[in-house]
Amino acid sequence: MPIRTAMTFAITLALVTAVGLGSAAAQTAMPMDHAARHADAPVSPPSAVPTMGGHEAFGTIQEIVRILEEDPASDWARVDIEALRHHLVDMNEVTLNAKAVATLVDGGASYTVTGDGRTLEAIRRMVPAHAHEIDGVSGWTVKAEPVATGIALTVTALDPKQTAHIRRLGFIGIMAQGGHHQMHHLAMARGEVRH
């Protein structure tokens, strides 16, 4: 599934969570003595149940498990939820802990992406795989090459508008491009692909 779809889903999920939690908190967090003075305040019906997993990675795993359990064709001998969990840890490392230094190049930018320990391992797994997925999207040429402490990700385009687009997205915006993440997660959980 495209990364763009993944980012849209993540942003939507975050907004729904924020609105939903804020609304639930407003309805249920009222102190008892205060509630007595506001008897007409809205109260959640007794049948209301929370829908959010409490953590995005946990919620992603929960969603994938639900899909697998509802699919009679799921091959439980191949299912590998732990592989998906490790990939989500990689995504977290690259998103939150990788350092990216941009250098402008003709038609775009080159991002030197570095990290230590677990972050470096995640960079080396994720960035080349993602570069392969989005090469050619929007007329971009995307290359990932190893450097001593990470990966150099170079993204260029012939269209000047795309050049500006690439430069303003920055490294993490480039990583958010495409729509393959969700289906990649499902295939990984099914034991069909490794990262």
Image: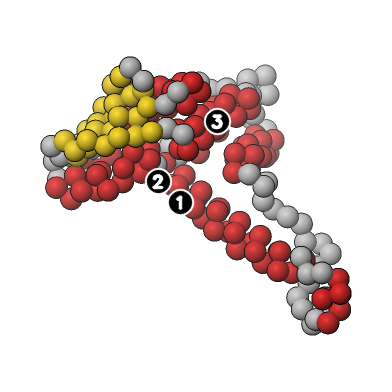
Residue underneath mark 3: 89
Residue underneath mark 2: 4
As shown in the figure, which amino acid type bears the numbered disc 2? Arg
Res 69 label = none
Whether residue 183 appears in this view of the structure is: no
Q: How far from the left and from the top, in percent, is residue 89?
A: 55, 30
Q: Nearer the viewer, mark 2 or mark 3?
A: 3
Query: SS at mark 3?
Result: helix
Is residue 91 positioned above or below 31 on the image? above
Q: Which of marks 3 and 1 is in front?
A: 3
The residue shown at (86%, 79%) is 36
- Image-based side of 45 in relation to 14, left or right: right
Between 145 and 69, which is closer to the camera in this rendering?
145
Query: SS at mark 2?
Result: helix
Q: How far apart are marks 2 and 3 (CA)?
A: 20 Å
- Image-based side of 6 in relation to 28, left or right: left
The residue shown at (24%, 33%) is 110
Residue underneath mark 1: 8
As shown in the figure, which amino acid type bears the numbered disc 1? Thr
Q: How far from the left and from the top, in percent, is residue 169?
A: 31, 46
Whether residue 88 appears in this view of the structure is: yes
- Image-based side of 144 in relation to 7, left or right: left
Looking at marks 3 and 1 on the same chain, the residue that comes earlier in the sequence is marked by 1
Query: SS at mark 1?
Result: helix
Asked where in the image residue 175 lies, by quadrant, the reply is: top left
- Locate the N terminus and report the quarter of the image it occupies: top left
Is residue 61 positioned above or below 169 on the image? above
